[in-house]
Image: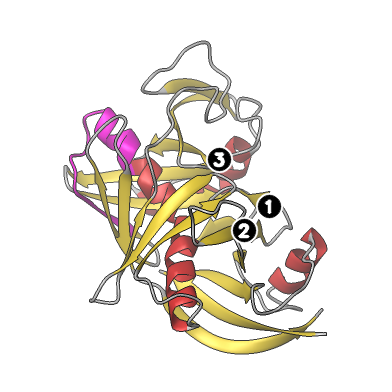
Amino acid sequence: MLLRFTKMHGLGNDFMVLDLISQHAHIQPKHARQWGDRHTGIGFDQLLIVETPSNPDVDFRYRIFNADGSEVEQCGNGARCFARFVFDKRLTVKKTIKVETKGGIIELRLRNDNQVTVDMGAPRLTPKQIPFEADSEAISYPVQVEGRTVELAAVSMGNPHGVLRVDNVDTAPVHELGPKLEHHMRFPNRANIGFLQIIDEHRARLRVWERGAGETQACGTGACAAVVAGIRQGWLQSPVQIELPGGQLDIEWAGPGKPVLMTGPAVRVYEGQVRL
């Protein structure tokens, strides 16, 4: 059978989006691996699936598969593309929608300037919630990796993140430390790893090694986690402009217990069909 799909991106973080409300198919990890291959498939960082919700209080269910076939809890750039997709495909007429994800419920708002704001909910900071192996909650943790100690903040935005500060993201050891920290024993579910450079209290630069995808052009949840980590350590103040290789995200966070708001673009690249 043939399935219609849309290729989209948020700041270069690219997605294949499938509507499984008007179409019916059983998607397996092997399909994500096959389609995600940039040489023999469609090529993407994540596969996004639109489904009917199991919760009657929300509008859609949102599932996310990495290119390696692993299913993950959350994807911020994908959430913006999800909002643009369901509105453009007339699956809803609402400009504010609630979406059920594996990591919890999030709210998406399409703005008149074609940007999308995502209410990512409050960050989870206790080690058990992230999950991260530690005796007690701390602003940052010393972590042994590659024979040295790095100071790492651990944050969950519905998915686990480690954030470390660097002097310059251009020379940061993203491809050296990223995979080591992604699979570090203190992150039992693996983690996304952010390398954060502070420019001033309202601006920062970020590169992210994403769990199951490698380095991407942008990571929405990674930007949120980095801002939370930076504010908690006194380096940043809300609102913050985060510059990623693919472009800029605007992040707001009023402090513990408050939701993180992320605003950025969502772009349709092309429409296609794929054989299942």
Mark 2 touches mark 1? (CB < 8 Å): yes
Q: Secondary structure at mark 1?
A: strand
Which is nearer the N-term, disc 2 or disc 1? 2
Picture residue at 42% right of the left edge, 78% below the top: 267
Above or below, 127 against 39 in this view is: above
Q: Is residue 101 left or right of residue 243?
A: right
Residue type at the position of mark 2: Arg
Q: Is residue 138 left or right of residue 2?
A: left
Q: Secondary structure at mark 3?
A: helix
Disc 2/disc 3 C-alpha distance (Å): 28 Å
Picture residue at 61% right of the left edge, 73% below the top: 16
Above or below, 207 against 245 in this view is: above
In what quadrant of the picture does the C terminus appear?
bottom right
Q: Secondary structure at mark 2?
A: strand
Disc 2/disc 1 C-alpha distance (Å): 8 Å
Q: Residues within 10 Å of mark 3 (few under 14, many from 20)?
A: some
Q: Is residue 269 left or right of residue 133?
A: left
Name the front one of labels 2 and 3. Answer: 2
Which is nearer the N-term, disc 1 or disc 3? 1
| Res 71 label | 1
Mark 1 touches mark 3? (CB < 8 Å): no
Name the front one of labels 1 and 3. Answer: 1
Q: Which range is magenta?
A: 227-243
Q: Position of residue 230 (x, y in %)?
A: 29, 36
Return the residue at label 3: 177
Residue placed most toward the observer, 216 or 117: 117
Residue placed most toward the observer, 241 or 131: 131
